[in-house]
Image (cartoon, rainbow, N blue to C red):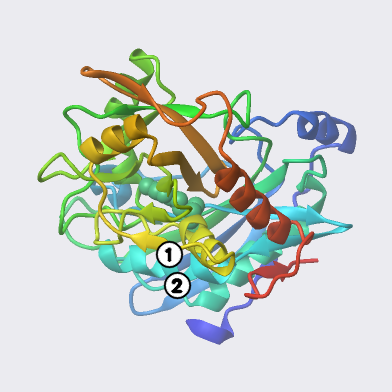
Amino acid sequence: MSGNSVQFDHKPNPAPMPAVQRDALLANPGFGRVFTDHMAVIQYTEGKGWHSARIEARAPLQVDPASAVLHYAQEIFEGMKAYRVDNGSVLFRPDANARRFNASADRMSMPQLPEHLFLQSVKKLVEVDRDWVPSQPGGSLYLRPFMIASEIFLGVKPSAEYLYMVIASPVGSYFKGAGGPVSVWISQNDTRAATGGTGAAKCGGNYAASLRAQAEAIRNGCDQTLFLDAKERRWVEELGGMNVFFVFEDGSLATPPLEGTILPGITRDSLITLARAEGLTVREERYSIDQWKADAASGKLREVFACGTAAVVAPIGRVASPAGSFTIGNPEVGGPVTTKLRAALVDIQLGQAPDPHGWVQKVF
Ligand SMILES: *Cc1c(COP(=O)(O)O)cnc(C)c1O
């Protein structure tokens, strides 16, 4: 029942959104508020495996109030984008998302979803909802695969039933007033992840735990929260949903290492590869907040940027905490290395540059 034998049933939405209405939404979709006509669904039952794969009309779920996910947060997700290229559409490294999804599933005691099912579900949804892939510059179709524990049981144990789904949302830029540097607030009391915890898993619980720190950042006039390590409160980890890079005066880069408390970003990995291909040195090493401040003051640190699928690459111009704030480079514009790496990545994603690593997969 699991594996290659799964067939997707296609039940078209009987009342898709009229084109005029859809195009009006696509003109200015914002982020994560507009959704397409369909969704992909695959069910899992212990002893039976994955079954009932289908593409159907996007609709509210019937969830029993005793569903395990509502109580113990057994939930994981992915985030990826389909880009419009010429008259078709492409995905960027979807195989890496499929692998990371299973790594997250392992951490949360959830079943492994065969990679080909993950890829098929995403590609079929993009194909069916092809008219929803934005064509304006900077636009894309954000895809959200996720899995929830759906067994109706209040005992604490891994669920015996799961629902895997993919929904799709046409998006513009992640940050309002896109392009300019963002400011970050150093979370004072809350940490994001500790050794042995779930920091490397893409699970909803990590986000729930980050919201208070994010509210603190906003209250203090900053865009995003920067988390330090849970033990020494000294080493830079990442933002709530983005990895961080530092660019030094000698042209080298550094980014915090993947030691279990940081989410292994696919954008992070891609940028390391691209930077090295440009002949730049990239170190995966710990960097302290004190060093950051000192290097920003001395001029040794030239640029800092955050990266992730949603925002791609966002320069960081200012760091704030109760001790005061400091800026990096010109806080009004991103630096040249940031700009160059962003362009190198986006050019591959949009098919405007050769793809030597085979990262781009055509959907239609
Ligand atoms: C998803 C995510 C990232 C970025 O990962 P990408 O694969 O580059 O999108 C970074 N940090 C956290 C906490 C995340 O959830």
Q: Position of residue 167 (x, y in %)?
A: 59, 50
In the drawing, what numbered circle is on residue 358? none
Q: Is residue 341 left or right of residue 51?
A: right
Q: Looking at mark 1, is its residue's CB closer than 8 Å to ligand 1? A: no
Q: Position of residue 308 (x, y in %)?
A: 50, 48
Frontmost residue, 251 versus 70: 251
Q: Position of residue 128 (x, y in %)?
A: 76, 58
Q: Which amino acid type corresponds to the residue marked 1 in the rendered image? A: Phe
Above or below, 234 against 318 in this view is below
Q: Secondary structure at mark 2?
A: loop
Q: Which amino acid type corresponds to the residue marked 2 in the rendered image? A: Leu
Q: Is residue 129 left or right of residue 107?
A: right
Frontmost residue, 239 versus 257: 257
**Residue 109 is at least partly visible in this image:** no
Q: Secondary structure at mark 1?
A: helix
Closer to viewer: mark 2 or mark 1: 1
**Residue 107 is at least partly visible in this image:** yes
What residue would you read off at disc 2?
Answer: 113
Q: Position of residue 77 (x, y in %)?
A: 44, 54
Residue lying at 33% horizontally and 14% vertically, measured from the top left: 220
What residue would you read off at disc 1?
Answer: 101
Q: Quarter-wise, where is residue 359 in the image? A: bottom right
Frontmost residue, 26 versus 21: 26
Residue lying at 27% horizontally and 64% vertically, measured from the top left: 107
Discs 2, 1 touching: Cβ within 8 Å: yes
In the orientation shown, which residue stands out farthest toward the left? 231
Q: Quarter-wise, where is residue 47 in the image? A: bottom left
Q: Marks 2 and 1, how far apart in space? A: 8 Å
Residue lying at 42% horizontally and 77% vertically, measured from the top left: 49
Badge 2 crowding class, 10 Å Cα cut-off, few under 14, some 14 to 19, many 20 or more, is: many
Q: Looking at mark 2, is its residue's CB closer than 8 Å to ligand 1? A: no
Count numbered badges in the picture: 2
